[in-house]
Amino acid sequence: MSDTLATATLVTGDRVTPGPRRRRQPYLIHAILIVGAIIMVFPFFWQLMTSFKTLAGATAVPPQVLPNPWDFSNYARAFEAMPFGQMFLNSAIITVCRTIAQVILCTMAGYAFARIPFRGRGFVFVLFLSVLMVPGQLFLLPQYEIIQSLGLLDSLPGIIIPGMFAAFGTFLMRQFFLGLPVELEEAARIDGANQWQIFQKVMLPLAKPGIIALAVFTSLNSWNDLLWPLVVTSTSENMPLSVGLATLKGMNFTDIPVLMAGSVLATIPMVIVFIVLQKQFIQGIAFTGGKG
Amino acid sequence: MTGISFAGRGSAQPGAAPPGLRRDRGRAPGQSGWWALLFVGPVGIGLAVFYLWPIVRTAWMSLTETGPFGGSSFTGLSNYEKLFSNPDLPQALLNTLIYTLIALLVIPIAMVIAALLNTAGLKGRGIYRTLYFLPVVTMAAAVAAVWKVIYNGDYGVLNQLLGFFGIAGTSWLTNPATALGAIAAVGIWSGIGTTLVIFLAALQGVPGHLYEAAQLDGAGPVRRFVSVTVPMISPSVFFVAVTTVIGAFQAFDLIYVMVAKTSPAMPHVKTIVYLFYEAGFIDHNPGLAAAIAFVLLLIILVVTVLQFGMQRKWVHYE
């Protein structure tokens, strides 16, 4: 550890050495970063390889690196072991609905908290903030009761509804709108635009980076969410992928390659979205701090 | 940092009437009131129903007991008494604390990687960042499945790798001594990308002339890291420390999916939230679960306040 630390400082020192000469690549630093990158990626590699092994191959001692023989039936069998397509669709619906709802609702509320003076605004905002401070488990039992009394247990709307509203999203968007210049709004107001027009035509386009950050954050959390859908759903047709995979393991499902195939399929969509929208993802996470 | 501050600028209300005075409608403030209702209303109702009311309701639940047929009766603090005499509680608190302390290792590790990535002229920075960030976008349930295979005592590849170095492995997730650490390591692995991105953003803001000045003063690399880099990004470190601790105190997903209910390691990995889940949704004892949730809230509040109190000692704001 102390070695790495010393290198880390070499780095920061390196930064200041000015020089017209071409910089040589710092091989030691690359070596450390590559070892780290291997640790980060290895589980994905292992997951993928195991998903093509036979059960005997997956549990062989010593472990097989490459499948021997290759077994391509695990993916088909993942669809037999659980209603995989349906769960996949459920996860997608939940993610899309929550994200759209939060983007619309939180953006509107965030704008009002930043720019529309109204009575009790400070008080209401503090109430919203108090929700941020409280661990999620505190909401869980009453949310369950409410969803139960609405007859929505074990249904997609039941999973979606509480996640449509977010204090964090409202807070995030408020902070974002506070950072935008007031002049444009005033100009639009003088031109006779009403509050909604100002919001929609003037402010919304400016808020795009904030909205993307919120959308990234919300979709990631919805896709990966476990505890709430776990307690709300009971039949596999209504489960999102996260719960489906978790319950498979709960049942001591021992067909490892099939489980890996399922995990690979659950991992791929977000990884693809991430690779395509990398810049937005990383900015979004840096902007939101990642954890809410 | 993240561009978010808790400055309560929203609390200033220009032109708000003093309480008790009627506001005239139709005039500007009244009209903006209607607009505000339109804009805030939808989220306001949702938050009130699904988040604010539940806080009150959970508080009430923690003071009641649910009978076998659903009715509940007020029992005062008996749930809390039961909780504090529950032998599982001290162990769960200890487990949560250990988990949190291990989870905090993400800070030094991410700091070193961020400093390495920040090397001037380093090629492939974007690729490294992508690879380190990859686990952030994958769900715990999927990640846990493969780590279980890797950690397995019989056919796990980790033990095989350790064998090359002459280290005897164990059955990481079923051995009570190693299970919690093994799970926390996965937690670090899956969360390091987030921390890294935050630190990298902070490092961009450290002006190069500070390093030059330090170097002119004869500061070596270690000294520059400790005296320039660390204090300059300390607000981000503080932010990460606060959010990591809050997150770690609520650890559940990885534990739920990585350790079987009947595993001998279970008592040694059960966290506070796991106790909550068991009480509320397995044992159907909402009163006890509500009491656990409140104790958790209290712990998180105390720890966060302590962290804010201590920040003066080590966080450097410009």
Image (cartoon, coloured by chain):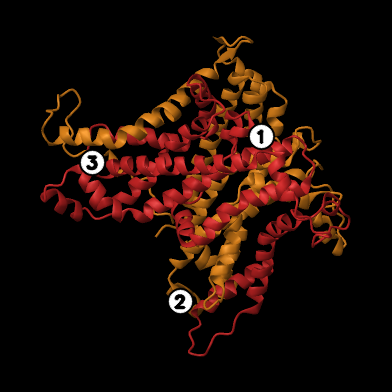
Side of A57 where B96 appears, left or right: left
- Of badges 1 and 3, the one in the foreground is 3
**Splitting the image into 4 quarters, where does residue A184 fall?**
bottom left
Circle 1/circle 3 CB separation < 8 Å? no
Image hue for chain B: orange
Residue designated by label 3: A116
Q: Label 2 lies in what chain?
A: B
Q: Residues within 10 Å of mark 2 (few under 14, many from 20)?
A: few
Residue designated by label 2: B213
Circle 1/circle 2 CB separation < 8 Å? no
Indicate the amino acid at tag 3.
Answer: Ile
Q: Which quarter of the rendering shows the N terminus of chain A?
A: bottom right
Image hue for chain A: red
Indicate the amino acid at tag 1.
Answer: Leu
Location of residue B180 with respect to A154 vertically, above or below: below
Location of residue B164 with respect to A102 vertically, above or below: below
Callout 3: helix, strand or loop? loop
Counting residues from the start of the chain, the first of labels 1 and 2 encountered is 1
- Residues at discs 1 and 3 both on one chain: no
Percent across and percent down for residue A105 are 36, 39
Callout 2: helix, strand or loop? helix
Residue designated by label 1: B93
Callout 1: helix, strand or loop? helix
